[in-house]
Image (cartoon, rainbow, N blue to C red):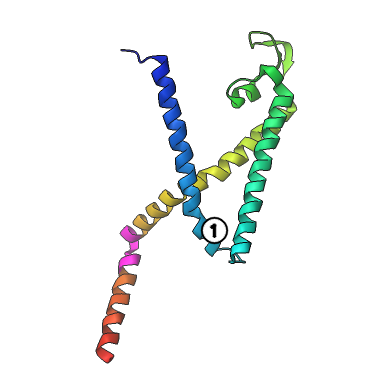
């Protein structure tokens, strides 16, 4: 049984919504590590850091989308990566014409996409990566168990003194 196209669109919308929620929740999870590792840990310093970061992200997305529309115009595909990889000019069916070449700017855009992906991967997987590293460290070295045991024993010794 083949699912209806409208059901597939609904599934895609749910996945897109879940991805947005996942990204937003990871942003809030990363606020405190970013704040605690900042030089200026005031509220004003953190707000400045976030404003600069979000400004750079917005600039990157706007530059990328503007350059894409300027380069490909109405021939742009729904997926920008498909447009980047095509040779231009193209005919009405979207096929490359004889003598067509890849825009040199396409390589710059591919590098911009690599930068965007490189910035998103650590951001999205920060929480899971940190938890996995803690599990591996605990399994190999018992670091957390040893630290907790030491603190508990030191606390017990302090109670005996008082």
Q: Position of residue 66 (x, y in %)?
A: 71, 31
- What's drawn in magenta, residue-wise? 138-145
Quadrant of the frame with the N terminus: top left
Judge by depth and name the residue closer to the eye, 79 or 104: 79
Q: Quadrant of residue 77?
A: top right
Q: Is residue 140 magenta?
A: yes
In the displayed structure, 12 sits above or below 153; it is above
- Give the quarter of the figure containing the C terminus: bottom left
Q: Report if residue 142 lies within the magenta region.
A: yes
User: Which is more toward the observer, 6 or 101?
Assistant: 6
Q: Main secondary structure of the magenta part?
A: helix
Specify the quadrant of the image occupied by residue 120.
Answer: top right
Q: Can residue 160 be seen in this snapshot?
A: yes
Q: Which residue is mark 1?
A: 34
Q: Position of residue 89 (x, y in %)?
A: 73, 14
Question: 87 or 161, which is in the foreground?
Answer: 161
């Amino acid at each position: 049984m083949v699912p209806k196209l409208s059901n597939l669109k609904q599934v895609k919308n749910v996945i897109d919504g879940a991805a947005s929620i996942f990204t937003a929740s990871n942003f809030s999870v990363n606020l405190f590590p970013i704040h605690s590792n900042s030089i200026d840990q005031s509220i004003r310093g953190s707000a400045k850091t976030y404003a600069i970061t979000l400004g750079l992200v917005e600039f990157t997305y706007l530059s990328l989308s503007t350059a894409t529309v300027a380069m490909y115009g109405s021939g742009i595909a729904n997926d920008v990566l498909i447009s980047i990889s095509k040779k231009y000019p193209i005919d009405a069916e979207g096929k490359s014409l004889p003598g067509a070449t890849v825009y040199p700017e396409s390589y710059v855009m591919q590098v911009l996409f690599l930068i965007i992906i490189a910035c998103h991967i650590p951001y999205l997987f920060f929480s899971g990566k940190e938890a996995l590293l803690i599990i591996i460290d605990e399994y190999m070295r018992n670091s957390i168990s040893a630290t907790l045991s030491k603190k508990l024993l030191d606390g017990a010794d302090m109670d005996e003194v008082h």
